[in-house]
Structures are given as C-alpha cells and as structure tokens.
Amino acid sequence: YKPLIDGMLRADLDAPPKQRHTAQRIYDRLVEGHEADDISYSMVRVYVKDRRKEIRRQAGVGPDAMFVPQTHLPGAEAEVDFGDVHVMLAGKMTKVYLFSLRLSYSGKAVHRVFASCGQEAFFEGHVHAFRMLGGIPRGRIRYDNLRAAVERVLGLSRARVENDRWTAFRSHWGVDAFYCRPGIEGAHEKGGVEGQIGYYRRNHFVPVPEVASLTELNAMVDQWDLDDEGRRLRSRTRTIGEYFAQEQPLLRPLPREVFETGRWFTPRVNRFAQVTVRCNSYSVPVRFIGRQLRVLLHANDLVVYDGRTVVAHHERLSGRGESRLVLDHYLEALLRKPGAFPGATALEQAKAAGKFTPVHEAWWAAARAAHGEAAGTRALIEVLLLGRHMEHEHVVAGLAAAHRAGALTADAVALEARKAAEGETFTEPVKPASGRAVQPQEETGGTVTFMSDWKLSHLPPDNRPLPSVAHYDQLLKRHGRTAGEKEGS
C-alpha cells in the first residue's frame, strides 16, 4: 500500500493547508477503498510521519521552518506592521490597533495606537515614526499587503497594484516599499516587527491599561518607547539606544513640505444637526442644518469646517452606526423646545462623559421646582451657554455656590462663576452705590450678590462736582422786565 499512500501525500502538495490528509484519513481510505484489513493504523502513522517530509523535500518545498541569517546595515532598512490590542477606554473594553515601525539594524521601534487600521492611521503612524526617529530609512521598508497600500496582488510575483494615495504618500517621503509574500511565509520575511509587537503587547499591555482617551494612551506609549531604548536584544553587547545613536545620523533627512494624512469629505448636515462619515454620525451646531460642510477625517479625530472656520471637533468613532453628539451644539434649539431637553441623546452622552455633573442635576431640579418645568429648563440651558466663554470648572463652581444660596437664575450663576474665575471670596456684606447692603444668607452658608449691585460696587469713585442749575435763572427773565419787578410797577 505504500504507492497508494505516497500518491495521497503528493496530492497534498497542491491542497489547501487545512484540507490535507491526516494519518487517520489515509488509513480510513485504504480500508474503505482498498480493503486493507491486514494493516493497522499505527503502521500507517509511522510510515506517514517520515514519508511526508521526504516527499516535500523531493518536491523542493523543503522543511517547514528554514531561515537564512541576514545582515542589516545601519539606517538602511525598516519593517512596518499593525497589531490589535485591547484597552479599557473610558470604562469600556475596546479593541484598538497598534502601529509599529522598527529599524532593522538597531531594533529601535516607534509605536502609535489608533482607533482603526485604515489608511489614515497607516499614514499618521509613518509620519509620527519618522518625526520621532528624526529621519527616514535610506533603503527598503518591508510591508504586508495591507489594503491601505495594496489594491491587488499580481499572481505569485512581487508586483503589486498600489493605492493612488499611498503612491503619492511614499513619493513625498521617499519610501522604498518592499511587499512580503501573502500568508505565513510573508510574516517570516519581517519577523523583527512581528516579534516586536508580540513583546510590546505582553510587556506593556498586561495588565490591560485603563485610560480616558487615546491621547492619554499614546502619551504612555511614547514613554514606553523611550524606556525600551535601555533594553538589550538577545546576545547583543549594547542597548537599543546605543545602536540607534549610531544609526540615527545615517537616516535620510525629513522633507520640509507637509503631506496631509487626513481624508476630506463634503457631507450635508441633516435635520438632526449631524454629518455622517464612514457610517457614523457627528453633531455640528444647529445653525448649519441643510448646509454642506467640509470634514477632515484623521485616524483618531474628525474636524468639521465651514470654509476655513472650525465648527466642530470630535474624537473618531471606530464602530458602525454610532453617534457622537455635543450638547452645546443643540442649546439654541433647546431654548425653543425645552421639553426635548430631558430625553436628548446629547444630554445622555454629556452625562456619560462627565460634562453634565450631579451639580447640574441638583441645580436643575431646584430650578424646575421653583419656576416650573419649562422655565427651569430654560434657566439651565442659559447656564450651559455660559460654557462658551467661561471654563467648565468655573461654571460648575458657580452652580454649586448658587445652589447653596438658593439662587436659581442664570445671572446669579454667571456672577458666582466669575467670582470663582477671579478667585474672589466675599466674607463681608457688599455696600453698593445705592446704599443697600446685600447680606449673605448665613442659614444656607452661601453668598448671593445681585448682578446690578455687583456692577455698581466695582465702578470707580465719581469725583465730579454736583451739577448746578444757576445758569437756568436767565430763562426766568422777561423782555423789558428785570428780575424782582412786580406786575404793574
């Protein structure tokens, strides 16, 4: 039965990797098709174990793992790859993507975390790495066949149909791209960066980092990259940082011109004051409803322009069908429709982000109890409008002080917020120009000053003389009669 078994093993050379004969399957076929009842499974297994390797070697495939040592010149080569990691982002377990560019000679690697592994992240990762390294490799950079760079692989050759924007990008930066073979064979052609991502994931993302934003996480990543310069690779006698100090002057200098890595879109604002980009919605001020705006999409954020003016700036969403709304964009509409405020999606997102605090909730509840639902909600919206020209923490401090004092108007909150911004503390009654002293409400522990009295108390002293009406006496004189003359004299 050996010729039959050899034929099955030779057929496996062209079969998909996961659809090749096992020893058990060969034994079953011999029993079913050739009535091989005089052999056992163990006999077949022993023969297949050695014969499979011989047949692969005779076909020129060779052993499964065979590597040729390589020598990398300083400043000549680099490798690029993406790896996925999980982080606790704003209290939610999120899958993000780790970009890595590693110099082959020194082993110096630069990393960046993005919400996606799209073309914007691919470009921005390169720009960040080149700037951190202070130069560009003079030789080739090895890549997988990423969709951000390669549109089509041409047969079994190294030829590729490149993406137009990628061609423009690498022409601008002078990148010489080398594309590895598809599959596991290609991974071995850039094993340095493959191993680097695995090391980075195990040593810096265990345990899972907890961060509020990707900006915070990337600041941590930059520090980790600096710390890794003190590490020694395998049996090398010097550290990564020492080898990089030798390699860095040999890198090609950076170009002076800037290449825009973001992608432009021109969506129209719908009736919900939102623009849709890459299947996700982002809010803009309600005054732009029906207008067509320009959107610049980056890897981690999104900027909306009206002409050259920035009208909205959002952190990019990584999923599909999601929305990111800013409460401030809807305040003008909510002033006219206060009944829509309690159930607004933008309000729920503001609460989740910590922008709408329990202090806001407490003051709003007191205002509704005092003025009614509509008037109390309008008063709160007027308070929220203060955030356009005052710091958020000052507005919250003003709300807290006004709530303690029982002052439930937007003017009172504005005054207390200004006092917090200026660092003012009033421990004595204020005596304005009108002469009426405004006493602190000792029973509530707060101090309330009326806006008009506060303005009068801050006016400079008036040293002008009192007005005189003496000049108006000339109007009492009549023609032909002097002052003091009597009628008929």
Image (cartoon, rainbow, N blue to C red):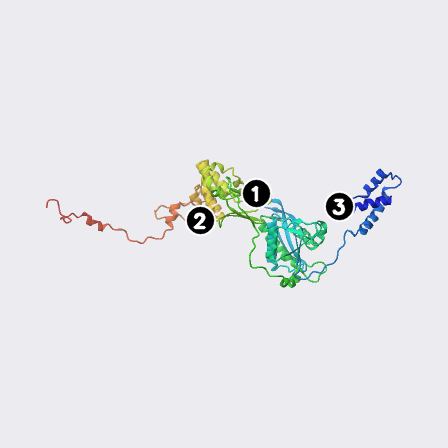
- 10 Å neighbourhood of mark 1: few (<14), some, or many (≥20)? some
Mark sitting earlier along the chain (3/1): 3
Contact (Cβ within 8 Å) of mark 1 with mark 2: no
The image position of residue 445, as x and y in percent, is 45, 44
Identify the element where label 1 is drawn: strand
Mark sitting earlier along the chain (2/3): 3
Q: Is residue 379 visible?
A: yes
Residue under label 3, please give it: 17
Camera-side residue of 95 and 103? 103
Q: Is residue 444 visible?
A: no
Name the kind of residue labelled 1 in the image: Asn
C-alpha distance separating marks 2 and 3:
71 Å
Contact (Cβ within 8 Å) of mark 3 with mark 1: no
User: Looking at the image, which residue sits at the far left?
Assistant: 489
Nearest to viewer (mark 3 / mark 1): 3
Residue under label 2, please give it: 418
The image position of residue 132, as x and y in percent, is 60, 58
Image mark for residue 200:
none
Mark sitting earlier along the chain (1/2): 1
- 10 Å neighbourhood of mark 3: few (<14), some, or many (≥20)? few
Residue under label 1, please give it: 280
Relative to 337, residue 78 above or below: below
The image position of residue 100, as x and y in percent, is 64, 53
Nearest to viewer (mark 1 / mark 2): 1
Name the kind of residue labelled 2 in the image: Arg
Apparent side of residue 2 relative to residue 387 in the rendered image (left or right): right
Apparent side of residue 75 relative to residue 437 in the rendered image (left or right): right
- 10 Å neighbourhood of mark 2: few (<14), some, or many (≥20)? some
C-alpha distance separating marks 1 and 2:
38 Å
Apparent side of residue 192 relative to residue 453 in the rendered image (left or right): right
